[in-house]
Image (cartoon, helix red, strand yellow):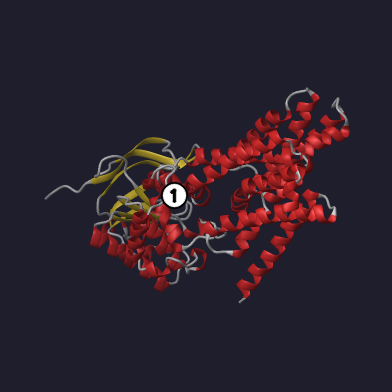
Amino acid sequence: MMELWSVPFLRHIVLAGLFVALGLSPLSVYVVLRRIVFAGAAVAEVASAAVALAVLFQLAPFPVALVLTVISFLVLSRLADSPRLPPETLVGMLYAGGSAASVLLITKAPRGEADILNILFGNILTVPVSLLWSMAIVFGLLSLLQYVAAKEFLISAYDPDMGRTLGIRVGVWNMIFYGAMGLAVAVAIRAVGALLTFTLLVAPGASALCLTERLSRTFTIALLIGIISSLAGVALSYQFDLPTGSTIVALLVGFFVISFGIGQIRKAT
Amino acid sequence: MAMAAELLKADNLTVGYGRRPVLHGISFTIERGDFLGVMGPNGSGKTTLLKTFLGLLKPLSGSIEKISTEGGHLLFGYVPQRESLDFHFPLTALEVALMGRFGRIGIFRRPQDEDIAYVMDCLRQTRMDSFADKPYRALSGGQKQRVLISRALAAESEILLLDEPTNGMDMVSERAIMELLSELQRDKNATIVFVTHLLSTIERYAHRVALITTDGQLLIGEKSQIMTPEVMTKAYQPR
């Protein structure tokens, strides 16, 4: 690990992995508990389409992706309670629409395909210093928000009716939560790509929920799993010449399989 | 004789979901220390009425006045149907009951030692203090209900509203929960409104009865006035 830290280019990769794990791992607990796992995947596709759209019209990709991602999450949060259709329907349509729009827009974009794919899907190996700063600020603020508004996020997800009777603005807190999710996804995708972003939004929380009966510990365990997977993934990919993002994803999935097994054994005994 | 303090006053109230009225033009009052059982056939609007009291649904017409005896807003202690809470959340009994304090703690503040002490006292009142550290989802139906009643007490509310508090319980657990509510009403002069479809529970424990009829009317009064064969037959008659 010290060898990784001594090379500036590798140091960026370590920091990118660390920041994205710090930002997304605690959020993953609520993504799983609120049953919005595939909303993360769908919005990731919208973010990709937004980047392609920005490239096509020669706009700055990040602000366009940020705006469309946050809007997508807010729309999902408002329409989730539609009495006509189950919420998965909207998520599915958003996923299909985002994926198709990305491909259609890429074909008309004026830049080289490899260049666009890099922008579109992110690459942890090419994270610039400016993006590292953005990640540090955004994920730092999101972590702070999750800490100070823990009770508001909890009651809005667990028992919104009780929250409303206590005078808590559940609708506003849900919008803040989904807005924060949109922001986190937009930043993370730009840095590490859709697959790692999606996995970090699910696996740490899912693993932690298999291992403990305390919500406060769930957040800590999710954070540790995210950080360990990211750092170990970077180290292993360097050591064995493997793709970094996929190595981290494989470790996160491995953590989940082991945690799920432990959870099942505990339940049986 | 001193007049009892009115907490809820409905005047010509019509309630329903969306634009569809369920109960038409009802007027009544709920006073401090009331122990009111709300009953009616399935789908008659019992939960709709409860949610309108709580402010979760807006009345379609008429008015509902909520009068706090302590100044400010009238605070409700809501006990939902326990099946409506998600069992995936890894919460202890104490963490669930602590939610009752969230409205009093204030925005961006975390629960303090005094909040935990207050909640432990509420768990003691429902005889659940020894289960404080146990996972909520591992508790029995009766124990979960006690934790939810503790949570409602933790809000320091002036009125407890319970939606089907003994639904799905065996007779022993049902009796224990209703005895607990009676005790709270008797010893602390708590105001309790509970919705149930069990006539026997109302007959045994409630002091007053609100009966919703199949044609959307609300009959409210003493048990001896409402629970007569004539009134009950009319109320439960299929339309």
Q: Specify the subunit that label 1 lies on.
A: A
Q: Where is residue A23 in the image (x, y as percent from the top left)?
A: 62, 45
Query: Going 42% across and 63% down the picture, which residue do you hit?
Result: B145
Residue B204, image x and y in percent? 31, 66
Identify the residue at the far bottom of this view.
A269
Which residue, as the protein is rendered here, is positioned at the far left? B1
Task: Say whether residue A174 is left or right of residue B199.
Answer: right
From this viewpoint, is residue A182 visible? no
The amino acid at mark 1 is: Met
Residue topped by disc 1: A162
Of residues B177 and B133, the one nearer the viewer is: B133
Q: Is mark 1 on a helix, strand or loop?
A: helix
B19 sits left or right of A259 in the view = left
Displayed quadrant of residue B7: top left
Residue found at x 43% / y 67%: B143
Whether residue B7 is visible here, answered yes or no, is: yes
Total tally of numbered discs in the picture: 1
Q: Look at 65% across and 57% down and name the residue there.
A: A225
- Viewer-proximal residue among B199 and B169: B169
> Crowding near pointer 1: few (<14 within 10 Å), some, many (20+)?
many
User: Which quarter of the picture shows residue B36?
Assistant: bottom left
